[in-house]
Image (cartoon, helix red, strand yellow):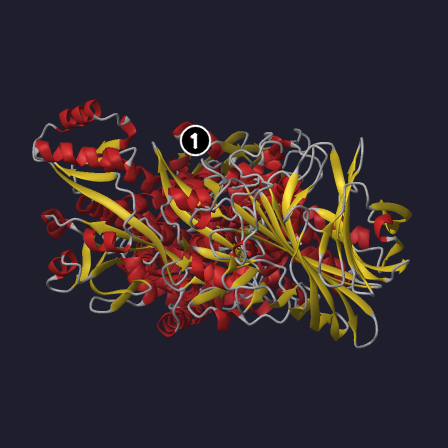
Amino acid sequence: MNARIALSALICVWATSALPQGYAGLGTVAEGFAFPQQETRLEFPLDHGPHPDFRIEWWYLTANLMGEDGADYGIQWTLFRSALAPGEAESWQSPQIWMAHAAVTSEDQHLFAERIARGGVGQAGVQSMPFEAWIDNWVMRSSDETIEKISLSADGRNFSYDLALSADGPLILHGDHGYSVKSASGQASHYYSQPHYQVSGTIELPDGPVKITGHGWLDREWSSQPLAEDQSGWDWFSLSFGNGEKLMGFVLRSETRDFTSGTWISADGTAEPLTPGSFQATPLKTSHVKGREIPTRWQVSLPAKRVSVEVQALNPQSWMGASFSYWEGPVTVTGSHSGKGYLEMTGYE
Amino acid sequence: MVLTIRNVTKCYPGQTEETAVLRGVSLDLAAGSSLALTGESGSGKSTLLHLAGALDQFDSGEIEIAGTRLSGLSDSQRAALRRNDVSLVFQQFNLIPSLDTGKNIALHARLGGTWDEGWGMRLTDRLGLSGLLERYPEQLSGGQQQRVAIARALAVRPRLLLADEPTGNLDEAASAAVMELMLDLVRESGTALFLVTHSAAIAQLLDRRLHLHHGMAK
Amino acid sequence: MTAAAFLAILSHWRRHPLQLATLIAGLALAAGLWSAVQAINAEARASYARAAEQLGTAGVARLIPESGTISVARYASLRRSGWQLAPVLEGVIRFERQNFDIMGVDLLQHPLAPALTKAAEAEAVSPLEALLPPGRIFAHPETAVHLAASQNVHPVTETEALPPGVALADLSLASRLLRRPDSLSYLLVLPDQAQGLKPLSDLAPGLTLVPASTAASETARLTDSFHLNLTAFGLLSFAVGLFIVQGTIALSLEQRRGMIRTLRSLGVPMRLVSGLIAAELAFLALAAGIAGLAGGYLVAAVLLPGVNATLAGLYGAPVDGSLSLRPGWVLSGLAMTLGGTFLAGAQSLFALWRMPLLAAPATHARGQNARRSHLAGAVCGVASIAGGVLILTMFQGLISGFAFLGALMLGAALLLPLLISTGLSLGARLAKRPFAEWLWADTRAQLPGMSLALMALLLALAANIGVGTMVSSFRLTFTGWLDQRLFAEVYVTTASDVQGTELARWLDAQGIKALSRRYHDTRFKGAPLRIYGFEDDTAYRSNWPLLDALPDVWDQAVSGQAVLVNEQLARRHGLAPGDRFELEPGWQLPIAGVYSDYGNPHGQAMVSMPSLLEHAPDIPNRQFGLRVASHDISGLINSIREEFDIPRKNITDQATAKARSLAVFDRTFVITAALNLLTLGVAGFALLTSLLTLWNQRLPQLAPVWAMGLTRRQLASAEILRSLILAAFTAVLALPLGLVLAWALLSVINVEAFGWKLPMYLFPLDWLRLFLLALLAAVIAAALPARRLSRIDPAELLRVFTNER
């Protein structure tokens, strides 16, 4: 994995701007970049596509799946865009850098791969009409300009998947019409989701192919400076309950005061932004993962909706040891509500 | 006198006067006469023969060959003496392997400029070498080689013929034949013969005999 | 018993110290020259490997275009098929005073990224800065100094991770500098690939996959011929050294026959005796081998700068670093010495093994025997030459060329004794005086003992004539070619295109014609190809060195209807006038002519300037050749320098340009000349040792002649005369051999190695000098034995006659 070692240092710097791991160096000043505005109203299909004037952006799809064999699986497909400078340019002059992560998780396996590409030369990108997001041969593609029906594929050295996704509910705009506040001092992003995908297809594992079905959740988010300076990382939950209700909630950890927020999605697809502080998540148990302690069982509560559940990682070792590393994996939910979901934890160094 | 040796002494490096190889030897040899020098190994016979051939230097005394005193001669004067007045026949024959018989026979005489074709022919005839002139030394028997060596020596018509155990490497029959021929030819050409041998039988064939013991004549 | 027997056997050397010295010196010489050459080769190869590794391309396969370049879209589409590839764009960029090889890579994909990141961080610079304008250049500290001195737009990061001479930049900067936003030179196939991908051969017709092992060695491939050349020289020296050894071993065993017989009659088994002698030889070989290695190291250290200059001059191959002990050549040197010693001693050892317990000492084969062995040698020699010719006619390639040379040299060496002996018989027949007669005959008798040394001399002389003729012919051709090629009176390089345009305008106003030299770098079948654009001028028509051309070559070329290619390109791909040539995909032209282009290993083509600009519009326009009618060239140069701020270095008159080229040429062949001289020295030494070896056998042959009235001084001069006669014969015979060698070098080896064929010129004065040199070597070699002879104690000669021998 020569290329990986090679890139880690480069991407580390980049990662500090993309993820809340301290705003060292390049990250502090977003010179010339656009900033999320509260009055912005999202427009589709245009906003499915990239926003090169913003520093960072992602197309983030996770899915909880069940195999023919009855076993639980999770997959991740993420395309990050990071701009070294705002705007787009021809060929190698493009300041856009693309990075993607793909993973397959089962109870005892967590396989992942990474791709990196330069913008401007066609190796990676996103277009909105018809919608297609790609890097190398990893593709998330729709046959029209909506993202109702998409196909999704990725591969790594020892796994691959090829899935069909079909949405049976509306897009969800988080926060105020998709303007999602990330700190008390006002850092924000534009953020919408499509949490209603029915998924079917095949994943190839080292032991052979597995036919799967399940539910998928796409997050779209872009910003230029999403976190406050003192925020060190986040814990992000996307939970789908058996009754059709869904909860997206996150904790932005800070030395002074954690910031929590999220969105409650009722069974009919109505989104209700949570007031800061109403979503609560408390670690119950940590696991030793790649030399660090990571909480892999959580107590999550949202009193307003009478939610009080335990969230347990399907595979506590779902570590994404890529150019920048984080924990990302499927979870099972028990308690007041039961269901499945995905958990992402960053900033555990 | 063809050869006069007066009170000659010879020391090799590391020898004292008492152990010198020659300790005051004197002798005379007239034209047409022959002298056999006998003595045990190490008695100095070969050394005396070499001195008589102007091949080596002596420490004191005097040697005269055909009226020329050897002391004080330069290297090239000695060489000239060897070319013209002295011939040698050795036990090892010492033919030139790269030359054929004919050229070997003529070589010494031609070096001295005294080669006489007729005399050479007679010599080869007498020595029974006529059929062997184009052979090389390695193709000849020991007796044949020694006859070539004798022909070479006599072709010069030397005043003095020196022979060092000329039949030492030959069997008895060959030895007798070679001696007989040599003595005949010496007599015919009036050459003086000075011969070193350890064989009493051969010494008996010559006019005079001199015995050398610890570097002194007896 | 073993120890006692061994001591007895070894005691021989105490009584023959000179023989021991000769043996060890011969072996050491052989081992020394061989390992020197090997050390140089190993160093250069290691240097290439280091360079390849430093470029991150060792062990990485490449996809190269069959012709032209790879479009960026093609790269993206291959990536989108799932293949993990890293793009590379290569070119030459001129900053102010100096050309730099620039290598553009995607810093996010290239295998070198970690090292470069580290280098950037060491300078407290964000590596990502390199992706943004103005862009950062990475270079070896040596090169970084020049880069920093030549421009100040792009910051330079120093890193030992890169080989000297390369400026590495992200593709964003490199494609900008080279003005090639849409093309790539080749793609690296990264080691980690997903499974089940469509094969590249299906996805990328028109691109050739070069496996990792050969991809890294483009330089190695280019320079192979040079190293083969050196190896051939090393082998020659080694063989010459073995000639010395063979004689000495034979003599030492010959002289110990008596002792060995005695040992055997005392009950020492033959097996043990042979074993002990073999052990003795092995020990001597090792001792001499180590001494030789030390000597070889020194020789290599002295020659290495010359070799580096050659490699850099001829191939642009970067060779850096100083000499180091490498197990490869150290072990091979020792092994060669050991093997060579036993090879040289094989015959003697075998004879010893077969020696009966009781037998008279074998007499030396002379006369008929010698003649028979000469004849046998000659038959083998003729067969060897015939075999060589057969190889040459049946097979192509450098190896076959060298095989022919080897067979020719071996054959000639085997023929030598018969030829010399015939010559000597003739001499003897013509001789009138007895002394002369004896001298000829005696010389002939010495031939068997001397023939190996004479063979060595023959080979050394022939190599000298051959290589010397090759180099001199090359130089003469090169000089003439320079006269044709450098026809402009003044050459100017401007700092920028803008300045270039201004200069052209200014010159036009002065009534001076400026021919611009613009080129576009691309690839043809994976190898670099430079396409020059030329502007019509009578000078081209009257001067350009065409080797082969259609009748209206210039009209066709000027009209853009045809292309001219250089000789190496034509030879490499079997092109001739009239053939069609694809310069880049979709750009085909018929070939109108082939021109000679010495000193350049790469392919080159010429088209009319308009048609070049049509296909490569953005190429720099900074180099000009000025046709000046007036004689005041230095005045013109001064006024150009006053008018434009052009450094002295960038404006050259014709004479200086020629002198510079010739200097490079001469430096290129320094190593050849040095090896030539060394080989001749070794051959001279072989002559000396063979004379010394023969010394003891000589006395029984000389003593009778001395007794017959030759002085010692005459004998001494005979000794020198004999050596002279033999050397003269050998030198005369070496001449035709050397000329055949020269022909093979010029018409076979050069064509394979460099891609150009050179006319052969003859240099009789050089031959005369070499002839005299050979005679001098003969006199020097014979001087020591002759001196000993002239002062020899008569007692020593007399010992030959004493009966107690």
Q: Position of residue A90 (x, y in %)?
A: 42, 49
The location of residue C113, given as percent across then percent down, is 58, 45
Question: Which of C9 and A251 lies nearest the eye of the viewer?
Answer: A251
State which chain disc 1 sits on. C
Tell me if residue C81 comes above or below residue C231 in the rendering: below
Q: Secondary structure at mark 1?
A: helix
Q: Nearer the viewer, residue C182 or A281?
A: A281
Left or right, C640 with reference to C798: left
**Residue C151 in sight:** yes
Q: Residue at x 49, y 73 (%)?
A: C202
Tell me which amino acid carries mark 1: His
Query: Please, which residue is most extreme toward the top here?
Result: C642
The mark total stands at 1
Determine if residue C794 is in view. Answer: no
Residue A347 left/right relative to C159? right
Q: Residue C616, how many percent across, how many down?
A: 29, 52
Quarter the N terminus of chain C occupies: bottom right
- In the figure, is residue C664 to the left or right of C101? left
Label 1, on which residue?
A: C146
Name the side, left or right, on which C36 lies relative to C535.
Answer: right
User: Vertically, is C784 above or below C545?
Assistant: above
- B160 vs C312, nearest the viewer: C312
